[in-house]
Structure formats: structure tokens, C-alpha cells
Image (cartoon, helix red, strand yellow):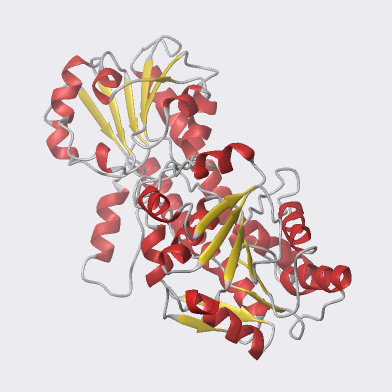
């Protein structure tokens, strides 16, 4: 790639854009990383990262200042690839994606776009936005013809936070291009680090691939979470039922239940599909119900905590609740708290309990304390705790000596193991621990 002097501008230095920029730089590509947040650019220029992603800081130290530059904007026409990786968050009032960040990023390209350049969208968008909004806007404002004067396509990100650098290279990349010439340009770039390029007939196929992919996972998780709630009401253990149903039975792959489904993608993309269905006059009750189940699961958990304390005759306001895991997921580990169900849990519990403590190995203490939660170590968190809740499956939450930790906790200690990291029979041998999980009251 370096032989032909191509240069790539990646717009948006978040979880998606920065990991892509680093991956391209590692492949020998010249990269300009752009973000409008000054603190982000200042941090990256110091070869430091502002979120946790294994291996990312190593790549920054190796390539930043060499073939990887960072800037608050584009200042010349040296780039001939522009990849838009900015966010498309959901408006909480309408459940529709906000497109102003993509529009702003696309407009920032216009003064510098020249004949022969390639524009690629990687942000998740509603079907039709790439072609009918972004490409048309570029044509209108520059006079350049898409597919002829500049090349255009949509290549959705498919990486999981905590393993992004590996998956950039080894998870197949879906390519939806405007025409054959655009596809060749995209292939030329993405094949520098990934040989598994899956071509679909057009841009719209690629856009919908991304939406359907995440919606499928959300619906599947909702099924598990609803079955878990049913099992709790029946006094059964969902984890035993799930494992038994899946055991050596290839037609089943029931996922584990969880304290809700968080993160920026699975909480957003189903709503984009629901909005499309509404325009097509197609009922999307399954998708809407799944999202509702996953959003209410954490409320069910909070209610269980309060009911348990009440049943024990505890003063809820004075009870100490220790929460482990504030990132939206623990494995692969990340520091991303966006749409974390732990935040919802805290907000449900705060009006009732004044003694909330928290721990997360990847999230900084300031972010946790900003929620009104006091940070502590695991050992300090267990001390005099009435409730301990394991909210994600981070490696630091596994293989703890719960019985030993519980010796300095309240008696009894309500231990809620949301990811079934521990053997309930073994813990039950301790007379002062009441074991619970999602799917087991």
C-alpha cells in the first residue's frame, strides 16, 4: 500500500475509528485520524489511549507520529480515502438515529474531495442513507459524480470491543459498493489487512446486514432473559435448564441470561430496524418486544434486590450494596460504559439506598463516582456488604474465594452472580451466603 502513496483519512477516533486507523497503520498504510474533540486528539498525539482496548496503545506508540497522524480537521487534499466512523446514537424521545454526526463528517470532506477519491461509510445507518443522503449530498455540493468521479461504498464494522484489533483482521468484512469500480477501490484498501471480503450486490444489502446482525443477537438474548424471569417465578434454575437443553443437542443454542443487554450497538440497531418496518407497514412486534424485555430485565433485578432485603428485615437505606462491573460487558474486557445496564441498576437503586459501592478493573474511578457510587477494591466492597452483585463477566470477577470474602460481609450476604461464574452448591455450604443469579431467585 505504501508503494502507491495512498493516504487514508479516518473520521471519528472512537472505539471503531481508532482501532481501524491503528490496524491500517500496522498494515503499512498512511493514516490521518480526525476527531473534533480536542482532548481526544491531544491524548492520541501523546501516544496514549483514552479507553481500554488490548494492544491498542502498543500500536499507537509504534505508529503515531510516523504513518499515523492525528488532527482536529482535514487541512489539505493529500488523502484519497475517507472512512466515516462517527456515531449514530438513538434519540431517546423518538428511538430514531441521530444523523447529524455523519452529515457533519461528510461535509468536512467536501472541500478536499477530488476526482479519484473514495468515500466509505462504516457507521451504522438506516437502509438507504448511504446512497440517498450521503452520496447525493457529496454530488450536490461538489459537482462530482459518484461511481465515476469519486468512488463510494458501505463497509459495516463488525468488531467486538476488547478484541477489536484481532477481529479487524480475521472477521470477514462485508462490502457493499456503488459499482464495480468502487468495489475495486474498497478491496484495494481493506485487503491490506483482511483477505476475507464478502461482497453483497449493493450498498443497501450491506446496510441491512449490519442491522439484522445485531437485531438477531438482541432478540436471542431477550428469549433467554424472558425464560430466566419465568424460571425465577417458578422457583427453578434457568441455568440448569439451559445447559440441559443445549447438552449434546445440536438444534439448541440457548444463550445465557444476563442482567439486560447493553452497549451502543444492540440497544440501538433494533430500533433502526423497527423504524424501517414502520415505513414499510410491516409489524415488528417481535423486535420491539425483545428490546422491551432486555430493557426491563435490569429493573427486575433491582426489584429482586429490594425484595430480598425487605424479606430479611433489613433497613434498605442503610444497607450496603457492592456492585462489580460497570462496563457494559466484561468479556472481552472493555472500559465502555455506554448503555451499560449497571448504570440503569444504579439509577433504580439510588432512591432507596444511600450506600452504593462499585468496582471495575477497566473503568476509571471518576466515571463510577460520577454515578453517585463510591469506588472500592473487591475486598473493601465485600466488607460489611449486605448485597454483592456481579454485573459482568470480567476476568477479575472469576475465581474469587467468595466464602472467604463473605466472612467480613453482612450476615447473611445476598450474593447475586448474574453470569453464573460460581458453583451455587459450593457457595451454599456457607451458611451466611444467599446465592442468586439471573434466572434463579
The tally of labels here is 0
Taking the spot 63% from the left edge, 53% from the top edge, the residue there is: 87
- Side of 112 relative to 122 (left or right): right
Classify 101 as above or below 387: below
322 and 365: which is toward the camera: 365
Q: Considering the image in quadrants, where does the C terminus appear?
A: top left
Q: Could you say where residue 238 lies in the image, as x and y percent from the top left? A: 32, 50
47 and 260: which is toward the camera: 47
Q: Is residue 173 visible?
A: yes
Taking the spot 30% from the left edge, 20% from the top edge, the residue there is: 381
Taking the spot 18% from the left edge, 34% from the top edge, the residue there is: 400
229 and 294: which is toward the camera: 294
311 and 395: which is toward the camera: 395
Q: Is residue 281 visible?
A: no
Taking the spot 47% from the left edge, 66% from the top edge, the residue there is: 24
Q: Could you say where residue 78 lies in the image, as x and y percent from the top left? A: 66, 66
Report which quarter residue 110 is drawn in. Answer: bottom right
Q: Could you say where residue 94 lies in the image, as x and y percent from the top left? A: 75, 48
- Side of 82 relative to 49 (left or right): right
Classify 216 as above or below 377: below
Amino acid at each position: 500500500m505504501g508503494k502507491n502513496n495512498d493516504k487514508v483519512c479516518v473520521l471519528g477516533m472512537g472505539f471503531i475509528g481508532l482501532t481501524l486507523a491503528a490496524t491500517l497503520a500496522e498494515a503499512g498504510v498512511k493514516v490521518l485520524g480526525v476527531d473534533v474533540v480536542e482532548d481526544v486528539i491531544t491524548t492520541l498525539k501523546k501516544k496514549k489511549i483514552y479507553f481500554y482496548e488490548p494492544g491498542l496503545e502498543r500500536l499507537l506508540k509504534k505508529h503515531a507520529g510516523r504513518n499515523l497522524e492525528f488532527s482536529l480537521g482535514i487541512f489539505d487534499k493529500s488523502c484519497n480515502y475517507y472512512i466515516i466512523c462517527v456515531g449514530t446514537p438513538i434519540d431517546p424521545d423518538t428511538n430514531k438515529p441521530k444523523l447529524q454526526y455523519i452529515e457533519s463528517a461528510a461535509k468536512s470532506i467536501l472541500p478536499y474531495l477530488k476526482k479519484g477519491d473514495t468515500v466509505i461509510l462504516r457507521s451504522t445507518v438506516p437502509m438507504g442513507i448511504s446512497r440517498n443522503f450521503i452520496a447525493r449530498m457529496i454530488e450536490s455540493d461538489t459537482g462530482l459524480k459518484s461511481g465515476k468521479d469519486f468512488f463510494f461504498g458501505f463497509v459495516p464494522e463488525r468488531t467486538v470491543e476488547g478484541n477489536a484489533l484481532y477481529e479487524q483482521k480475521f472477521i470477514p468484512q462485508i462490502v457493499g459498493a456503488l459499482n464495480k469500480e468502487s468495489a475495486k477501490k474498497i478491496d484495494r484498501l481493506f485487503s491490506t489487512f483482511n483477505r476475507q471480503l464478502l461482497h453483497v450486490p449493493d450498498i443497501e444489502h450491506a446496510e441491512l446486514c449490519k442491522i439484522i446482525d445485531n437485531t438477531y443477537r438482541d432478540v436471542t438474548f431477550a428469549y433467554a432473559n424472558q425464560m430466566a424471569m419465568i424460571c425465577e417465578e417458578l422457583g427453578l434454575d434457568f441455568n440448569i435448564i439451559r445447559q440441559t437443553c443445549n447438552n449434546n443437542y445440536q438444534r439448541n443454542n440457548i444463550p445465557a441470561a444476563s442482567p439486560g443487554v447493553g452497549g451502543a450497538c444492540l440497544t440501538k440497531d433494533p430500533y433502526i430496524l423497527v423504524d424501517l418496518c414502520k415505513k414499510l407497514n410491516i409489524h415488528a412486534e417481535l423486535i420491539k418486544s425483545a428490546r422491551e424485555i432486555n430493557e426491563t430485565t435490569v429493573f427486575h433485578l433491582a426489584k429482586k434486590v429490594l425484595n430480598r432485603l425487605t424479606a430479611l428485615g433489613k433497613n434498605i437505606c442503610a444497607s450496603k450494596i457492592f456492585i462489580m462491573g460497570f462496563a457494559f460487558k466484561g468479556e472481552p474486557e472493555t472500559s465502555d460504559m455506554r448503555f451499560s445496564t449497571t448504570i440503569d441498576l444504579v439509577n433504580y437503586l439510588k432512591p432507596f439506598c444511600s450506600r452504593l459501592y462499585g468496582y471495575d478493573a477497566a473503568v476509571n474511578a471518576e466515571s463510577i463516582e460520577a454515578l453517585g457510587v463510591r469506588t472500592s477494591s473487591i475486598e473493601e466492597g465485600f466488607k460489611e456488604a449486605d448485597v454483592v452483585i456481579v454485573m459482568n463477566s470480567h476476568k477479575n470477577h472469576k475465581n474469587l474465594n467468595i466464602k472467604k470474602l463473605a466472612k467480613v460481609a453482612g450476615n447473611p450476604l445476598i450474593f447475586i452472580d448474574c453470569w453464573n461464574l460460581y458453583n451455587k452448591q459450593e457457595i451454599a455450604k456457607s451458611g451466611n451466603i444467599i446465592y442468586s443469579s439471573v434466572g434463579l431467585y
